[in-house]
Amino acid sequence: MLDLKITGGHVVLRGEVLRLDIGVKDGTVVRLEESLADEAAERHYEAAGKHVLPGMIDAHVHFNEPAMGHWEGFATGSAALAAGGCTSYMDMPLNGLPPTVSITALKRKLEAAEGRSRVDYALWGGLVPGNADQLAPLAEAGVIGFKAFMSEPGGEGEDRFQRVDDEALLEGMKRIAKLNRVLALHAEDEAMTVRLARQAAAEGLTGALDYAASRPIAAECEAVRRALLMAERTGCPLHFVHISSAAAVELIQAAKDRGLDVTLETCPHYLTLTEADTVSLGAVAKCAPPLRSAEERDKLWQALADGRIDLIASDHSPSPPELKRADRFFDAWGGIAGAQSTFELMIGEGHLKRGLSLPFLCSLLSLRPAERFGLHPRKGEIALQADADFAIIDLNRPYKLSAEHLKQRHAYSPYTGRIMGCRVSATVLRGNFVYLYNSDDARTDDYSAASADDSMKGDGKWLRYRY
Ligand SMILES: NC(=O)NC(NC(N)=O)C(=O)[O-]
Ligand SMILES: [Zn+2]
Ligand SMILES: [Zn+2]
């Protein structure tokens, strides 16, 4: 007998969408057929009129435990992801304390996560000045890659995450190349952004647009260019996080064309918000690199449609709302808390509005991240023998996002008040419902029903995939 069957849905596969029924046993997809009507199953979800997509894999979130759980934690952050159709995520090595830059810190991170996550996860380690000797042990312990900042990451306290100088970056790349891991880079040129911020302060310029002007596209391109030169010398695989400009995409594309092992992500906020929103919404829409012009946003969509963007990640980096209130926009915390909305924004804007196909968008949201960071073939697409990780989506149910919908630690997002073009109806992790929107109950999203807890039992919580 099957554990679960999902019938009547349109199933998004690699390159095509088919009307199929799905059979699940022991957390794995075991049947994909036109009809499983006569098949016995412990649970049955009728998905007629809905689409079944591979669960999203979010390669970039900041859950700030240990020590900073009052900013965001594994339980609340992963509940938000589950409500947004995400079934696996990769946690960044900051802004918890200590940051994940040593084996001791990794253990603390794992303890903080243990038994609290609603969906599957993997961890990033950090590359910072002075931790070169920790890279091999961290890789051995299973981190999926390393993250480094080329500009100041922000935060307070001596043990906060430190940016790399060129020397530490080059040395780190040499080592990471040998470890068969990817180095993820926050690419903004420190010298340029510091100089421009100082200049703005000296001129008394403190607003949202002044902040954006102090972190121009040129700063992103300069850092990307320098990192690519070092990658060429060291052979280190690179992944550029949160790329905000088409010009940077082009630099990276040229490197790909030269044969470099390099990928890039962008985030829903660069595709759906602009610097004008930073003015109207305030620091809830503050991030680094900053939001750009509407013209730049459209160029980024074009680059995406042209296949020049490898993946989409949320870069969910929340803080308590107080830290978003500051007289000078420069002083507010930078980071956008969009974990719950990636899928709905990308399907709503990318598919329903801009006409990109669902298989294409799912490759950016699931398959490519799974392939890049070693989770494929177990995760990343709906296929026989793969994990039964799904987002079940209703394309005919637009809704207005409000603070009450948000499951994250602080119900604070630049997308509240926005009409989402579609809605996640249910999220399934290895055959278990980890989120269920109960459309009969107009008041609440009832996701405590179903067997949410099942997903937290057993193994596979921390994915230890090797290349
Ligand atoms: N310290 C952070 O979490 N920073 C993050 N903040 C952003 N993107 O504004 C990031 O990933 O750079
Ligand atoms: Zn960053
Ligand atoms: Zn980030």
Image (cartoon, grey):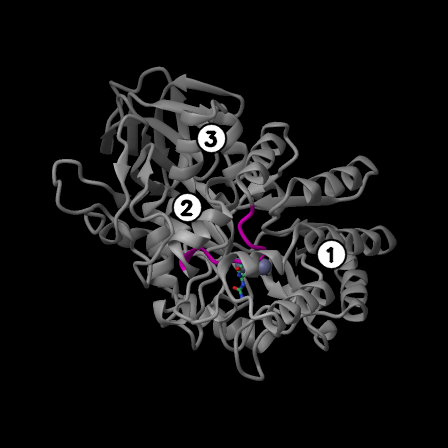
Q: Secondary structure at mark 3?
A: helix
Front in this rendered view, residue 330 or 242: 330
Marked residue nearer the N-terminal end (3 or 2): 2
Mark 2 surroundings within 10 Å by alpha-carbon count, few (fewer than 14), some (14 through 19), many (20 or more) = many
Residue labelled with disc 1: 223
In magenta, the rendered stretch is: 284-292
Q: Which mark is residue 27?
A: none
Label placed on residue 87: 2
Residue at image location 70% in from the left, 66% down from the top: 190
Query: Does any portion of residue 457 appear in the rendered image?
Result: no
Whether pointer 2 and pointer 1 mark residues with C-beta atoms closer than 8 Å, the reply is no
Which numbered disc, 2 or 1, marks the residue that appears first in the sequence?
2
Q: Position of residue 454 (x, y in %)?
A: 29, 52
Front in this rendered view, residue 317 or 216: 216
Q: CA distance from mark 2 to mark 1?
A: 32 Å
- Determine the CA span between mark 3 and mark 1: 29 Å
Q: Residues within 10 Å of mark 1 (few under 14, many from 20)?
A: many
Q: Which residue is mark 3?
A: 350
Q: Is residue 77 left or right of residue 237?
A: left
